[in-house]
Image: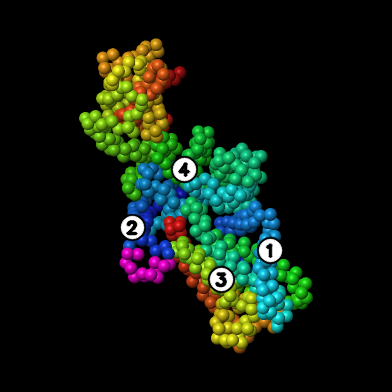
Amino acid sequence: MLQWAIIICIVSLSINKFKQKYRYSFILLRQLVITDFKLRYKGSVLGYIWTLLRPLALFVVLYIVFVGFLKVGNTIPHYAVYLLLGVVLWNYFVEVTNNGVSAIVGKGDLLRKLAFPRYVVVVAGSFSALISLIINLCVLAVFMFISGVSFTFNALWLIPLIVELFIFSLSVAFMLSALYVRFRDVNYIWEVVLQAGFYATPILYPIALVMTMSVTAAKVMMLNPVAQIIQDARYMVITSDTLTIGGVYGSLFAGILPITIVLALFIVSILYFKKMSPSFAEEI
Amino acid sequence: MDDNIAIEVKNVYKNFKLSHEKADSVKSLFVNPFNSKRTKVETQHALKKISFAVEKGEFFGIVGRNGSGKSTLLKIIAGIYQPNKGSVDTNGRLVPFIELGVGFNPELTGRENVYLNGALLGFSEKEVDKKYKSIVCFAELEDFMDQKLKNYSSGMQVRLSFSVATVLAESDILLIDEVLAVGDADFQRKCFEYFKKLKKDKKTVIFVSHDMSAIREYCDRAVLIENNEIIFSGSAEDVAQEYTKLFVENIDIETNLDVDKKQTKENNSLTKWGSGGLDISNMYISKKSYSSDDNFIVFSYDITKEGEFSDKINPGFIIKNEQGQSVCGTNTNISLKNQTITINNGKINIKWTIPNIFSHGIYWLDVAVLSASNGDTLQWWNEAGSFKVVNKKNTPYPVSPIVKIDIS
């Protein structure tokens, strides 16, 4: 009994210590996310509806062009929702990383006057994007219902996949935000990278199409964690006709590759951010 | 660290790297990665060997001229900058007031801004909830809290931010920069009342300023920073005196320059201006430095007629202190009613004797001659001279007259 009491004591103490240490960060994170959300569509007539309209508009355009005219996805069942899921997840990545680029420099005024933990502004950006992602996924659910996709428990796999996407996007955001303090052309470079990335990721077209042309190209493309996440999500939620990374490599363990990339990038970007953050206030 | 110590600054050094050709674009990295020019950085020493400790409940001043490094030091204590060497240990919660209304957003309502600003200072929603009423009350903005900040007047914004900062920050340690003391007279009075309250409540305060009267009035101890180093530390009074000395050395040079000017009869348009007809010269002050034993301050100047000038004149003076505040001044129209003064023989000398009621410090004299008939400024001589007052019975106010006290 005594051992248990001691263990509980130690655990509760360390939780308290953790709370104390990150108290300021939590308070700030909460307020920044709330503020960001309040301000996002301030002054626009449709307000928060834009959170839904933006990906939907892109989806409609892509659907008309690729399904209507180019007839890309007619081999895949429920291609419309298949496409929408890809667009929604990609948009999340774009939003987080774009927020990330300007997170530190954009808050320069604040940084020069207060000593709050710097990472909070970057994390806040990815949380407010997460809110729009969740809203968008709800819309997706409605579309799935309309097009008659059956809901299964496999859809729960979406949660770890979103966690992976969250960590990956956040890592990129950390890296970009710290780099942008020193190198002000990061935002232009990143714009180009995102544009290329949109086409290099199997969002519009099925990866199977690439497989028929070049297996190596498909293998390289699937190393991109966003590609792996999108394909896995489609596989779990919409149709098992989706080719996942395991299918491309012919091995179930291939999924470890992009996850390793995510973790490695996470560690590197956090270390870099930590190293750079003390001098942000001076360098901005 | 000793439990009585609130802040300990140990041997702090701070350099800023100023690169001449900053590699702020990736291109320059790629184009010429081995170019030594790119890495050529000039190191600017901002702080050297700074050490001091502030005890709990102490009102501690940091004094120094512009550019001496005091704001950098404040930012290091606040944790905004990291020192290159040395350390700063704080014992308790620290709230910096480097600027009011940091993070205020014009698109949010007053209420939302209070919570945002509170969070930036490290206060949770619950903590702000508890004090929300008194914040609004103190700012006197009860009817405006649900309006957007952009619809506030600037005075209302300042009131709100000051109130958030002061009501919330009932914390252990406060860092106050002098920027707090900007604003209209009413606001300044509020600030100083707040300082008094802090002092009464025995809060630990670090106060950065070059307003010596505020330092003398509120601080227990202070340090003087000059050329990035602490050159003096001690009681607020001693530090304020040392600080004043920094300027006295400069004044001596200036008065010498004045002599040169007179010899060459060079009229600087910046120091002398007016519609003309006469010239003020030969500024004479009986002493460079007056002590408490000198009962009077005596000075005189010549007024020389130029051309066919025959108007009645009204000579006067203004004495300004270190802060540029006009302490006293008068002219013959006020002091000698119904007496007309004219320059009959081309030149007159006018001598002024005023009681020495001044507080410790340096004073500058502006002298002027106005037209007694239409009030035009015939000539105004800015900072025609200066003198120093060493007062043993000094008070932190603009004047320290000798007061007769009867106790019965």
Who is closer to the viewer here, B71 or B90?
B71
- Which residue position is annotated with label 4? B179
Tag nearer the camera, 3 or 2: 3
Point out the residue furthest to the front here. Answer: A69
- Which residue position is annotated with label 2? B43
Query: Is residue B34 located in the magenta-colored stretch of the structure?
Result: yes
* Helix, strand or loop at mark 2: strand
Whether pointer 3 and pointer 1 mark residues with C-beta atoms closer than 8 Å, the reply is no
**Marks 3 and 1, the one that precedes in the sequence:** 1
Q: Residue at x 69, y 69 (%)?
A: A60
- Residue B30 higher or lower than B233, as above or below: below
Which stretch is magenta? B26-38
- Dot 3: chain letter: A
State the mark number for residue A195: 3
Q: Tag 2: residue type?
A: Thr
Query: Is residue A276 located in the magenta-colored stretch of the structure?
Result: no
